[in-house]
Image: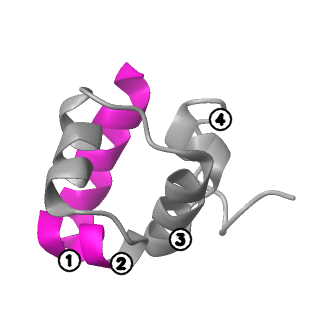
Amino acid sequence: MLILKERLLQLKKEKGALQQEIANAIGVSLRTYQRFEYGDREPTASSIVALAKFYGVSTDYLLGVSDERGEGLHE
């Protein structure tokens, strides 16, 4: 999921967040989050939802389904 990896890096930079802060916020270990960011591991659905909430974007945006960030999650 190249798009997800790119979007995670972009959003982290924009927010000025640290990897550990993000990992804590979404309930995964630092190493697990790093694997998401490096593209070595795909997040679970619950992690994708948590990431969308953390960044205030839609899951569609994170996954590359849409280029519009949206406000929160699409239902």
Tag 4 near tag 3, CB within 8 Å: no
Mark 4–mark 2 Cα distance, whole angstroms, equals 24 Å
Q: Position of residue 75 (x, y in %)?
A: 87, 59
Vertical order, 30 against 24 (above or below): above
Identify the amino acid type marked 2: Ala
Q: Nearer the viewer, mark 4 or mark 2?
A: 2
Left or right of 6 in this view: 38:
left
Instruction: Give me the disc on residue 56.
Output: 3
Q: Secondary structure at mark 2?
A: helix
Identify the amino acid type marked 4: Ser
Residue 18 in sight here: no
Q: Earlier in the sequence, mark 4 or mark 1?
A: 1
Q: Viewer-proximal residue, 32 or 21?
A: 32
Q: Position of residue 24 (x, y in %)?
A: 28, 77
For label 1, the residue is 21
Is the magenta region chiefly helix, strand or loop? helix
**Which residue is pictured at 53% across the width and 45% down the height?**
44
For label 2, the residue is 25
Instruction: Give me the disc on residue 66.
Output: 4
Vertical order, 12 against 53 (above or below): above
Q: Nearer the viewer, mark 2 or mark 3?
A: 2
Q: Secondary structure at mark 3?
A: loop
